[in-house]
Amino acid sequence: MEYKHFNHEHNLAIFELQAGNGIHCSGCRTLCSGSAYACWKCNFFLHLECGNANRSMEHPSHELHHLTLVPCPTYSAGSFVCNACGAPGSSFSYCCPLCEFDLHIRCALLPAIISHRAHPHELSLTYGLGPQAKVSSPPDACGICHKLVDNKFWTYSCGPCKFQLHTSCATPEMVPISYQADGVSGNAAAEAGPGFYKEENGSGSSPNGSKPAEVEDPVLETQLELMRLQQELELSNQLAKMMASYNLSSLV
Ligand SMILES: [Zn+2]
Ligand SMILES: [Zn+2]
Ligand SMILES: [Zn+2]
Ligand SMILES: [Zn+2]
Ligand SMILES: [Zn+2]
Ligand SMILES: [Zn+2]
């Protein structure tokens, strides 16, 4: 079975990668083992989770706008700071270019409620105030690593007990209880998900030609704006691909 991913020119197939192989996922740049999508010619690999990620999503932490999955950061620095965990990223991100809001795929897919052996009650995902926020209340310590947790970034917390964990500290041993974000599923099933290429007819063009200059419906207006942005992203995506293919051919 072969899959066509929007960010890779060749078909991908699912392989079992052994642990300790040093292979990194092209989507999240972290180590990749177990079932994964692969193009061996190009050393292009994707976790199932990263390959299956939806092209766009609505996330409750950013209710104003849709987030669009972009294969590489659109910022001049070439990296982004994740609004969820505060760590940088240089590959796939769920991005709102209007607000410069970015999430790692993993962070965007964090479950809303978990249980964790570090605490007897359920912990809920609590959104931070963003990297630019001023921290007002004195920060508390994480229940696992005991380092301070600042309220710019997301935590798993139990309100009544004032107990909190960094998301990165919680994830290795958490047990997901419920998901909240649109189109998020708990298991990365080994099927081609919406991240995979679909021929969509007529997207972005209307058969009646030009749209009226004045759009009164704010939702429609936002969608038009998004379409424009997505076209721009598509362009930068193609540019990146061209550059990548230069790099590859120069290696031969
Ligand atoms: Zn990945
Ligand atoms: Zn390839
Ligand atoms: Zn993150
Ligand atoms: Zn936004
Ligand atoms: Zn911690
Ligand atoms: Zn509690």
Image: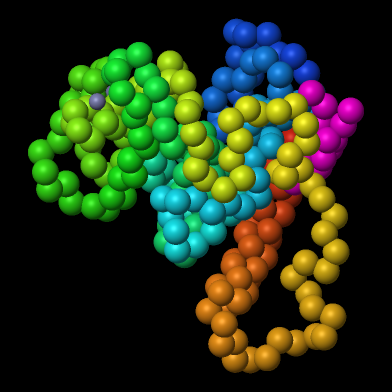
Of all residues shown, which one is farthest toward the right? 1
Tell me what residue is drawn at x 59 percent, y 40 percent.
Answer: 184
Instruction: Identify the coloring.
Output: rainbow
Residue 25 visible in image: yes
Query: Dividing the picture into quarters, in which one does residue 114 lie?
Result: top left
Place of residue 241 in the rendered image (x, y in percent of width and height, measured from the top left): 71, 47
Tell me what residue is drawn at x 58 percent, y 51 percent.
Answer: 57
Q: Is residue 251 left or right of residue 213?
A: right
Residue nearest the observer in this picture, 128 or 234: 128
Of all residues shown, which one is farthest toward the bottom? 213
Q: Is residue 41 left or right of residue 181?
A: right
Q: Quadrant of the N terminus?
A: top right
Q: Is residue 55 left or right of residue 162?
A: right
220, above or below 141, in the image: below
User: What range is drawn magenta here?
Assistant: 1-14
Place of residue 69 in the rendered image (x, y in percent of width and height, measured from the top left): 60, 49
Residue nearest the observer in this picture, 115 or 225: 115
- Residue 6 lies in magenta, yes or no? yes
Tell me what residue is drawn at x 61 percent, y 23 percent.
Answer: 24
Tell me what residue is drawn at x 45 percent, y 63 percent.
Answer: 64
